[in-house]
Image (tube, rainbow, N blue to C red):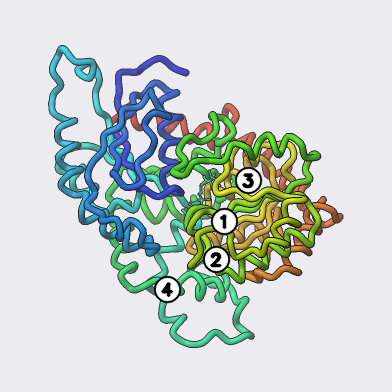
């Protein structure tokens, strides 16, 4: 931990679990390098200030009604937040930038920049008008960030039914996605998304730099080269470094801490961890297929079912009592887990994952091989990377069926193919770990970022 350098960074996370985690992770990294941190945040999904006593938190009203907060349409939530946070954010930021009273502690510090999410599209012009440099954070990996700007152009592809013969065709504009992935990715995404993407592109290009907190040269080399050409702004790829900092205290839901003592009782690399993240939902019939798949595999499991994740149900009441009794013989079902601690645990042998980028990066950081069941957005691309580029996982190709799940779990935990996957994951973990060491690519990129922030 370096001593204070007299500089303060203002951070403004997007209030979604998958975006909050990398932003707070970055705040921890910058704080360890001597920067003071102020987090401006919405009331909706506010981070827990008490978990980060060294940061200053300032809440702004976001104008979301209770019904709007519960709306599962993430793009709509982002659009509304971008409309309703404009004046409260402007007022708060302007006040912070006013010369401090010489008696106060803040008077000794200089505010260097704003760091916020690429999806905050109103902040670039505001920062410019206040003469404050703005850096942006992307929660995805570089390939997805680059490729997702081709969505408006790809949309017409999905107007015609997808023929069996073309399902696996590569999509040149959005590698390494296949045609069937584009159909799934765009399913339910309205054309209002296109305008949002256009603004994200423009405001990122106008920013002072782009940060990938959980990605590095080792994970996404070619896309980084392309992104530097396209955006012509400094791009920093500084991670993933989850295992270098204390596990996340940014959970919006209370993690069930009984997971760890339960894992302590299991054999090394014997448990399959199952979690579909903070956004994905499943049908009751799919819940039952997962339950049967886990039961039939006869392997120990730790399964996270978020409250609200099963459409039309409270929690897991659709699982018949008899099956539940049998599930309890081998496994544990919780509402939310301390995921980073879980993935770190010696008992975890595999992760049946939705492949959100944070979860994928956390799994790589801990060397845990995956079974991929992506649901939405960048998850499809992350799963292709895991299974086809790095070959550190098995792909379920959207088959939420008990036999497929049972087969994949056994293969990963018990068979030679699983052993080979585990070996490759071990090598990938080492490669990523080495990039964080002195003179590794992520290490150097972080040094560049720190220098850049100091230079503003
Ligand atoms: C969303 C999008 O769906 C995803 O595609 C995008 O990459 C980020 O935002 P989300 O479901 O939030 O993804 O997944 P992910 O990016 O993996 O983030 C989930 C975070 O919640 C992870 O950091 C994970 O450690 C944490 N988590 C998840 C827990 O702490 N406990 C849990 O039980 C489950």
Give the answer, above or below, for where 213 lies relative to 162: above
Give the answer, above or below, for where 159 lies relative to 42: below
Residue at 33% in and 24% down: 36
Residue 282 is tagged as 2
In space, the residues marked 2 and 3 are separated at their CA atoms by 22 Å
In space, the residues marked 3 and 1 are separated at their CA atoms by 13 Å
Mark 1 / mark 4, whichever is N-terminal: 4
Pinpoint residue 13: horizontal percent, then vertical percent.
35, 43
Q: Are marks 4 and 3 in contact (CB under 8 Å)?
A: no
The yes-or-no answer for disc 1 within 8 Å of ligand 1 is yes
Q: Quadrant of residue 290?
A: bottom right
Residue 100 is tagged as none
**Mark 1 surroundings: few (<14), some (14-19) or many (≥20) residues within 10 A:** many
In space, the residues marked 1 and 2 are separated at their CA atoms by 9 Å
Pinpoint residue 29: horizontal percent, then vertical percent.
45, 30
In space, the residues marked 4 and 3 are separated at their CA atoms by 29 Å
**Mark 4 surroundings: few (<14), some (14-19) or many (≥20) residues within 10 A:** few
**Mark 3 surroundings: few (<14), some (14-19) or many (≥20) residues within 10 A:** many
Q: Is residue 233 visible?
A: no
The residue where tag 4 is placed is 188
On-image quarter of the C terminus: top left
Mark 2 / mark 4, whichever is N-terminal: 4
On the picture, is 398 further left or further right than 416?
Answer: left
Mark 2 / mark 3, whichever is N-terminal: 2
The residue where tag 3 is placed is 363
Pinpoint residue 348: horizontal percent, then vertical percent.
72, 43
Which one is in front in this view, the residue at disc 2 or the one at disc 4? 2
Q: Are marks 2 and 4 in contact (CB under 8 Å)?
A: no
Helix, strand or loop at label 4? It is loop
In space, the residues marked 2 and 4 are separated at their CA atoms by 15 Å
- Number of dots carrying numbers: 4
Q: Are marks 1 and 2 in contact (CB under 8 Å)?
A: yes
């Amino acid at each position: 931990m370096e001593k204070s350098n007299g500089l303060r960074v203002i951070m403004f996370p997007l209030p979604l679990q998958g975006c909050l985690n990398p932003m707070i992770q970055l705040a921890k990294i910058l704080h360890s390098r001597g920067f003071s941190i102020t987090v401006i945040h919405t009331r909706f999904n506010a981070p827990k200030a008490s978990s980060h006593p060294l940061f200053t938190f300032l809440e702004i009203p976001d104008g979301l009604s209770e019904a709007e907060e519960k709306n599962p349409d993430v793009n709509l939530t982002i659009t509304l937040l971008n409309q309703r946070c404009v004046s409260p954010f402007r007022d708060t930021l302007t006040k912070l930038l006013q010369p401090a009273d010489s008696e106060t502690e803040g008077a000794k510090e200089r505010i260097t920049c704003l760091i916020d999410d690429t999806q905050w599209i109103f902040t670039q012009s505001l920062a410019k008008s206040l003469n404050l440099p703005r850096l942006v954070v992307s929660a995805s990996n570089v390939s997805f960030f680059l490729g997702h700007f081709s969505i408006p152009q790809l949309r017409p592809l999905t107007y015609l039914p997808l023929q069996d013969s073309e399902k696996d065709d590569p999509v040149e504009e959005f590698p390494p996605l296949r045609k069937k992935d584009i159909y799934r990715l765009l399913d339910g995404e309205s054309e209002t998304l296109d305008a949002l993407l256009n603004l994200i592109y423009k405001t990122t290009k106008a920013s002072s730099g782009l940060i990938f907190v959980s990605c590095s040269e080792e994970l996404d080399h070619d896309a980084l080269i392309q992104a530097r050409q396209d955006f012509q702004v400094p791009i920093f790829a500084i991670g993933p470094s989850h295992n270098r900092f204390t596990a996340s205290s940014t959970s919006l839901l209370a993690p069930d801490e009984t997971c760890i003592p339960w894992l302590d009782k299991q054999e090394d690399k014997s448990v399959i961890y199952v979690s579909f993240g903070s956004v994905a939902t499943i049908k009751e019939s799919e819940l039952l297929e997962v339950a049967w798949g886990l039961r039939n595999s006869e392997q120990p499991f730790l399964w996270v079912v978020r409250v609200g994740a099963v459409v039309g149900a409270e929690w897991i009441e659709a699982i018949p009592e008899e099956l539940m009794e049998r599930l309890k013989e081998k496994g544990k079902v919780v509402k939310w887990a301390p995921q980073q601690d879980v993935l770190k645990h010696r008992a975890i042998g595999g992760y049946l994952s939705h492949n959100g980028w944070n979860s994928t990066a956390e799994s790589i950081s801990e060397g845990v091989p995956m079974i991929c069941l992506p649901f939405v957005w960048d998850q499809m691309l992350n799963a292709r990377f895991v299974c086809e580029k790095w070959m550190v996982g098995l792909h379920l190709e959207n088959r939420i069926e008990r036999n497929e799940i049972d087969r994949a779990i056994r293969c990963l935990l018990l068979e030679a193919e699983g052993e080979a996957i585990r070996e490759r994951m071990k090598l990938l973990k080492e490669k990523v770990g080495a990039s964080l060491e002195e003179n590794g690519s992520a290490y150097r990129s972080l040094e560049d970022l720190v220098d850049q922030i100091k230079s503003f």
